[in-house]
Image (cartoon, rainbow, N blue to C red):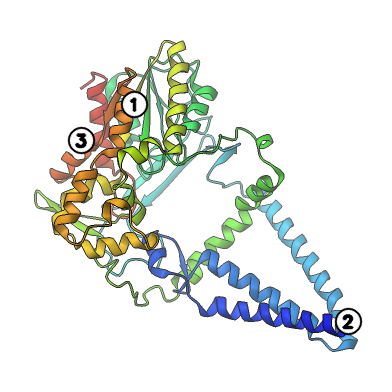
Amino acid sequence: MKTAFAFLVRLATVGVASLALVAWAMPSNVVRLISKEEYILLGRYGIDHFHAATVLTMVAAVAIYVVFAPVHLKRQRRVAVVAWSLTVVVALTATDVILRVMFDDAAYVHVGELRLRPPNMDHRLVYEDAPLPHRSLPTIRPGYPSYEVRMRTDARGLRNPEALDAADVLLLGDSFTEGSRVGDDETWAGRLAAESGLVVYNLANSGDDPQKYLAKFDLFGRDMGAGTIIVTLYEGNDFRRSAPLKHSVDDYDLGEAIGNYFRFAPIRVRYERLLREGLGRIRADAPVDDRGALDWLPFPFEANGRISWYFVKPKRIELMFTGAPAFAADTGWHTARDAVDALISAAARKGARVIVAYAPTKARVMMPLVVDALDAVAVLRYVQLLGDSLPDGLTDVRDTEQLAAAMARYEGEMERVVRDYFEDRGIMFVSLTGPLREAAKRGLQTYFTYDQHWTPDGHRVVADEMLRVLGRR
């Protein structure tokens, strides 16, 4: 019996070692990782793949060290493994605690699922519109010109010059309203405040969604006396949530709490940063066997003698072919609209009106302008990086003419559902799709090349539209 058990243990050890070798031998889907703008290590592994292969290798090495040890050394090696393990755990824990205490440089402060910036932050950087991962598209085109960004937060950790107790206009939204990669004075919120003559207070944070908009209003905005509340809904990811918002640490179960502790651990953040910058540079320029799926990106758009380039993720293209019936029945849309409805009711009790602004994706604004020049086969291959199946709107597409027809057929379907819902309830709805697209036709680059957000020019367009809506233009 003992001999059989020992044999099974050795067999399991060999199995784990074999799995480790297979994990290193098989690369990740590099083309798919590039399409999602994810980091690639050693030119062939996604970060999760690399971690899995590393863990398997460590487990296999320790198992081989112990299981295949001579009989007289087995006990000694077991004790050594336990001692090493405890030493590593203690060292990592101590390092993490020191980093948390001495280097409080987290990008966000978390209140349950709500995220706030560190209070009274004053951060400067030069933003370069270029791919973040070292291994990226086969052809890199020039992005929006580089410029200096200054980002300040108030005492609440919100992007305002100062924390106010009263305001005329409250803004709720995600990174498009907070102003990602754009300076304080160039965000549409900053422009609106400077040019409207109104007191504007921005409650938005990157990563927020409609349930968080409602929570932010309850937390900060309910008693500010604002007469107008502008809620910006981003087409890209504001309709994904289906679970209730967690408002405090008490809403998390033990597993979730532990997961969050390690997820935001500063030692992990620094470790992954080292991996990206160190191993991410190795073989970053290796050839990519993409079968033409990436060759068309970033795509160009020329207007008024100016060429701008645009990279879009396959998920954003797939989203363009969401039909109104499917979206209207989607749980994510119901969750979002219920949160906005609750916000509208809370605002009405305070005598405030709500304006719903709709922010489209870069793909939806720009791709219809260039569809006649696109290779439909390449676009389909690119979308299929998400999986083998295509969305219903693309299953019968074989050429560019059919792609253009499908794009026209699905144009604005999601937006129409949102517009009809709120306008039927007497809520003002503002579409930013038309202004952004018309600005692009005039030669303005309203979205960054490699990032999904609005450029300073895009924020200018949105600010002008909001000023018009508020009667200040």
Q: CA distance from mark 2 to mark 3?
A: 77 Å
| Image: 140 above or below 236 | below
Mark 3, Cα crowd under 10 Å, few <14 / some 14-19 / many 20+, is some
Q: Which residue is mark 3?
A: 435
Q: Residue at 32% of width from left, 66% of height from top?
A: 137
Q: Amino acid at mark 2?
A: Met
**N-term mark: 2 or 1:** 2
Q: Residue at 36% of width from left, 61% of height from top?
A: 35
Q: Amino acid at mark 1?
A: Tyr
Q: Which mark is residue 1?
A: 2
Q: Amino acid at mark 3?
A: Pro
Q: How many marks?
A: 3
Q: Which mark is residue 421?
A: 1
Which residue is farthest left? 304
Q: CA distance from mark 3 to mark 1?
A: 22 Å
**N-term mark: 2 or 3:** 2
Q: Which one is nearer the viewer's eye here, 191 or 254?
A: 254
**Residue 268 image point, x, y percent:** 61, 58
**Residue 341 image point, x, y percent:** 43, 23
